[in-house]
């Protein structure tokens, strides 16, 4: 089914992703063929789950359980800082692009289901003591204190579901 995905669809999404990445100060992997395979994986997951789960991780198919691995995932920036690439190597650092650092396979820093559940429980305890919850955009880090997160992040335009209760 997905072998027949039109190349034009992949190319259009690749160009949009590249433009959005560069506008946010990020760079896509310069290996265009490799990157377009990842883009195809994002599109497959979009069609399958109705969200763009990381193509290199196993998705549950439940959006709330996969919010941390919707591209760009919560682990992109720490991975870029430490390794120069994100887990799936869609995003790379300037050092990788300049040849100062080699692209290598990296460990997945996503916590186990049990660890994520414990983190969620700890956040709930802390949040309950505040007058207003603090919402954090998981894409760009924007913070706001209000009853509900904004419908769209004013910084990066991520949708409401990409916000998490921060404090």
Image (cartoon, rainbow, N blue to C red):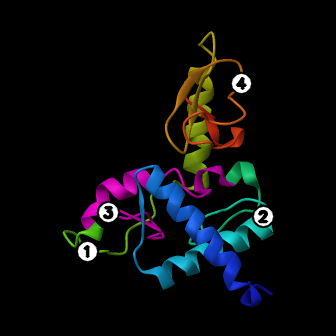
Numbered badge on residue 102: 1
Residues at circles 3 and 2 in contact by the CB criterion of under 8 Å: no
Mark 1 packing: few (<14 Cα in 10 Å), some, or many (20+)?
few
State how far apart marks 3 and 1 are (Cα): 8 Å
Q: Which residue is mark 2?
A: 49
Q: Is residue 16 magenta?
A: no
Which sits in the foreground, 105 or 155?
155
Numbered badge on residue 37: none
Point out the image quarter for the N terminus.
Answer: bottom right
Q: Which residue is mark 4?
A: 148
Q: Is residue 110 visible?
A: no
Position of 164 relative to 51 (above/below): above
- Residue 83 lies in quadrant: bottom left
Q: Which residue is mark 3?
A: 84
Lower sequence index among marks 3 and 1: 3
Residues at circles 3 and 1 in contact by the CB criterion of under 8 Å: no
SS assignment at label 2: helix
Q: What are the residue bounds of the magenta stretch?
A: 66-95
């Amino acid at each position: 089914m997905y072998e027949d995905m039109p190349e034009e669809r992949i190319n259009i999404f690749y160009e949009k992703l590249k433009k959005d990445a560069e506008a946010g100060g990020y760079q896509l992997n310069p290996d265009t063929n490799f990157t377009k395979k990842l883009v195809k994986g994002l599109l497959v997951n979009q069609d399958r789950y109705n969200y763009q789960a990381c193509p290199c991780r196993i998705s549950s198919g439940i959006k709330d359980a996969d919010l941390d691995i919707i591209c760009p995932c919560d682990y992109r920036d720490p991975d870029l800082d430490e390794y120069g690439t994100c887990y799936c190597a869609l995003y790379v650092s300037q050092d990788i692009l300049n040849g100062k650092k080699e692209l290598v396979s990296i460990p997945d820093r996503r916590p186990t289901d049990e660890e994520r559940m414990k983190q969620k429980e700890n956040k709930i305890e802390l949040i309950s003591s505040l007058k207003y919850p603090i919402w954090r955009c998981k894409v760009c880090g924007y913070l706001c204190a209000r009853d509900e997160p904004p419908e769209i992040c004013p910084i990066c335009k991520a949708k409401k579901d990409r916000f998490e209760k921060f404090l």
